[in-house]
Amino acid sequence: MSPAVHDLDDLAARARDGSPRAVAQLISLVEDGGSAGGSERARALAAALAPHVGHAVVVGLTGPPGVGKSTTTSALVGGLRADGRRVGVLAVDPSSPFTGGALLGDRVRMGEHATDPGVFIRSMATRGHLGGLTAAAPQALRVLDAAGCDVVLVETVGVGQSEVEVVALADTTVVLLAPGMGDGVQAAKAGVLEIADVFCVNKADREGADATVRELQNAMAMTRRESGPGWRAPVVRTMASRGEGIDELLAAIDAHRAWMVEHGRGDEGRRRRARAEIEAIALADLRAQLRAVSGSVALDALAGEVAGGGLDPFAAADRLREAAVDEG
């Protein structure tokens, strides 16, 4: 049973003290925000956590299936822990068509860190949300930040090349590719060159690794990116399954963070996350209002007028919004 609103302060306090159980409960609450009473609890939780966020650095990892995102994420966790940093992982998986839960479960794939009290790993299901993430990801990040994580790694779902939404959440975005998969060409077409702060060519012992690196470097040379003076996304080679190149990857991530701070952009990722979270909450409220109207005869009547040619769909949408405002 979900805790009542008045119990959330205690739960948040235990999460800040590092209780894995409390952190898990809070993330479950933000995932369940759309249920009965969920919105009220989500608001109370956000208020309880607000004074305690703003510390964690968020690193997004994205790329097509098969490049080794989970293996690389696990290797990064090991490197960060060796450096004494507390780590959170949000691993976004495809949803089960039957339960709506995470289908793959990265906690199984990162089992070597399961008993480390300095690591919290959570698999989250997309639940139909596009862009490689989940609608609850921004608030889950807030929970891990308030729980004292120094770094939060966000691994996207890996269903294709459209998962660029991670850039709205991350301070540093790592795009992973692998040789022999045609990923360099795909990346250029999909626009991930514009979102990458660091490129990681994983499985670099494979034939074609040099060609993939060259292709990325050439593509970047022809791509104008308004990221300010002095930063150009490095290309790091790794063999994550053997832990090779992970120190270099961490160094590149830290270098990007240092560059952001040096150029007065250290809070940029935090502001981006806040904008995305505010927008997502506002849109969710609007969708709820529209669903309330859709349940009435208004939408059916408008649809009949549009289908009959008596009204255009834009005018119908205006009327639907007006009805939602009147009912709200």
Image (cartoon, rainbow, N blue to C red):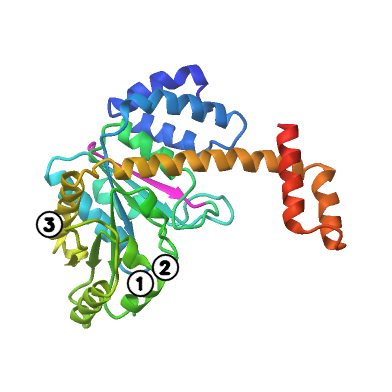
Note whether residue 105 is visible: no
State whether the magenta stretch is mostly helix, strand or loop: strand
Q: Is residue 264 above or below residue 229?
A: above
Q: Quadrant of the C terminus?
A: top right
Residue type, numbered disc 2? Gln
Does 292 sit above or below residue 183?
above
- Residue type highlighted by circle 1: Ala
Q: Earlier in the sequence, mark 2 or mark 3?
A: 2
Quick one: quadrant of the N terminus?
Answer: top right
Instruction: State which quadrant residue 314 falls in.
Output: bottom right
Residue at 51% x, 21% y: name it: 5
Q: Which residue is mark 3?
A: 247
What residue did someone put label 1 on? 187
Q: Circle 3 — which element?
A: helix
From mark 2 to mark 3, how far is it between C-alphas?
A: 27 Å
319 drawn magenta: no
The numbered dot on residue 213 is: none
Of the two numbered discs 3 and 1 on the same chain, state the one appearing first in sequence. Answer: 1
Mark 3: few/some/many CA within 10 Å (<14, 14-19, 20+): some
Residue 128: percent from the left, percent from the top? 55, 54
Q: Is residue 36 left or right of residue 68?
A: right
- The residue that disc 2 covers is 161
Whole-angstrom CA distance, mark 1 to mark 2, is 7 Å
| Number of other residues with Cα within 10 Å of mark 1, as a class: few under 14, some 14 to 19, many 20 or more | many
What span is in magenta?
117-126
Secondary-structure class at tag 2: loop
Q: Residue at x 85, y 63 (%)?
A: 309
Q: Taking 274 as reference, is 112 above or below it?
A: below
Give the amino acid at mark 3. Asp
Note whether 213 is above or below 295 in the view shown: below
